[in-house]
Image (cartoon, grey):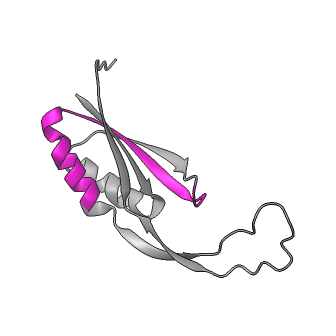
């Protein structure tokens, strides 16, 4: 058994959930918040047999796309911010961060 932990952007979460269910994966969906952009993410917990890990990764890759987004940086911490004028910067967001972990035991009650 393997546990796949996938952190995806909220915009991709409903599409990914539907695709995982369509491919007969059991999924637990958790709301989470990213530390860098402080924006909404969704964390998926997927338990599966080792032989199905590559299929799960393929489904995640097909449904979680990166995209460009403009953000306005926050003012610098400390000091005088009177002269600070934030300009929007373009960054890449989305996609998925995925961890595949071994499972020593699995119980379903």
State the residue in front, 83 or 73: 83
**Left or right of 80, for residue 45:** left
Residue 81 figure quarter: bottom right
Q: Is residue 82 above or below residue 40?
A: below
In the foreground, 47 or 26 = 47
Picture quarter containing residue 58? bottom left
Question: Residue at left 75%, top 81%?
Answer: 85
Residue 13's spot in the image, x, y percent?
40, 57
Q: Residue furthest left?
A: 51
Instruction: Name the quarter where the C terminus is drawn.
Output: top left
In the rendered structure, does residue 96 fall within the stretch colored magenta?
Answer: no
Q: Measuring 86% from the left and 77% from the top, which residue is drawn there? A: 82
**Range covered by the magenta-colored residues:** 36-61
Q: Position of residue 51 (x, y in %)?
A: 12, 37
Compared with 68, 63 (above or below) is: above
How many marks on residues? 0
- What residue is drawn where x is 30% and y is 55%? 18
> x, y percentage for residue 25?
24, 42
Q: Is residue 45 left or right of residue 49?
A: right
Residue drawn at x 25%, y 32% as measured from the top left: 2
Name above or below for residue 109 compared with residue 61: above
**In the orientation shown, which residue stands out farthest toward the front?**
79
> Is 50 colored magenta in this rendering?
yes
Q: Position of residue 38 (x, y in %)?
A: 61, 57
Screen quadrant of the N terminus: top left
């Amino acid at each position: 058994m393997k546990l796949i932990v996938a952190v995806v952007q909220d915009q991709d979460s409903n599409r990914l959930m539907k695709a995982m269910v369509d491919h007969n994966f059991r999924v637990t969906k958790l709301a989470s918040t990213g530390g860098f952009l402080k924006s909404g993410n969704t964390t998926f917990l997927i338990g599966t047999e080792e032989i199905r890990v590559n299929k799960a990764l393929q489904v995640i890759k097909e449904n979680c796309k990166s995209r460009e987004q403009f953000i306005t940086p926050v003012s610098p911490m400390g000091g005088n911010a009177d002269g600070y004028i934030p300009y929007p910067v373009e960054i890449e967001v989305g996609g998925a961060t995925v961890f595949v972990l071994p499972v020593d035991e699995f119980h379903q009650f």
